[in-house]
Image (spheres, rainbow, N blue to C red):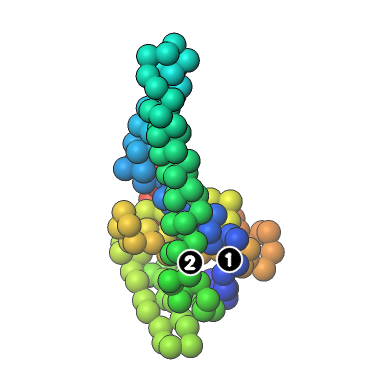
Amino acid sequence: MTIAFGYEKKQVIQGLRYHFLSRPEIKILVILINVFALGSAVLFYFKQIQAVSFLIFSLLWFLLMLVIWRILPTSIYKKSKTFKDSFVMKLQDDGVVLSTGFGDRKWPWDAIQFYVETPYFFHLYFDARSFFLLPKDTAQTESSIPEIRAMISSKVKKGK
């Protein structure tokens, strides 16, 4: 199966957000900041802490969300030349071949540890931090998406 594609900025940024928010360390950080922000709100309401403490935890929450939701995905998008290039990907029985104007690269299916499907992409993970985004809108027809999904799921285990 051969797929030709490029990337759309809004979709890539949303895919990167999904990746960052799925990381366990980010999940824990978001939960802790939310607990401390809510705790400071309750303590402020009962006049156990000063307004400055409540303001600091609220500011931490706001900054964390700003970094995860806006700054981090946008900076990754701007730094990476990958998202500005166009590709041809061949899904074969023995692996994946990715072609650009610069050359080809082949990965056997066992080099891909797991995949995650999101609204816009199939995230093909080589390890916990290294992945490739395969856009779903590259499929010529809606019936191609189940074929791509079937090919990937038959060769790679599904992630969380």
Q: Which residue position is annotated with label 2?
A: 77
Dividing the picture into quadrants, the one containing residue 57 is top left
Residue 154 x/y as whole percent: 44, 55
The numbered mark at residue 69 is none
Q: Measure how far apart labels 2 and 1 are at the Cα level.
A: 8 Å
Residue at screen point 67% across, 68% down: 140
Q: Secondary structure at mark 1?
A: helix
Q: Is residue 50 left or right of 142 when viewed as pictured?
A: left
Which is more N-terminal, label 1 or label 2?
1
Task: Tell me if I can see residue 31 in this picture.
Answer: no
In the rendered view, would you say 97 is above or below 51? below
Label 1, residues with CA under 10 Å away: few <14, some 14-19, many ≥20: some
Residue 90 x/y as whole percent: 48, 74
In terms of depth relative to the viewer, which is nearer, 69 or 152?
Answer: 69
Q: Amino acid at mark 1?
A: Lys
The numbered mark at residue 9 is 1
Q: Are marks 2 and 1 in contact (CB under 8 Å)?
A: yes
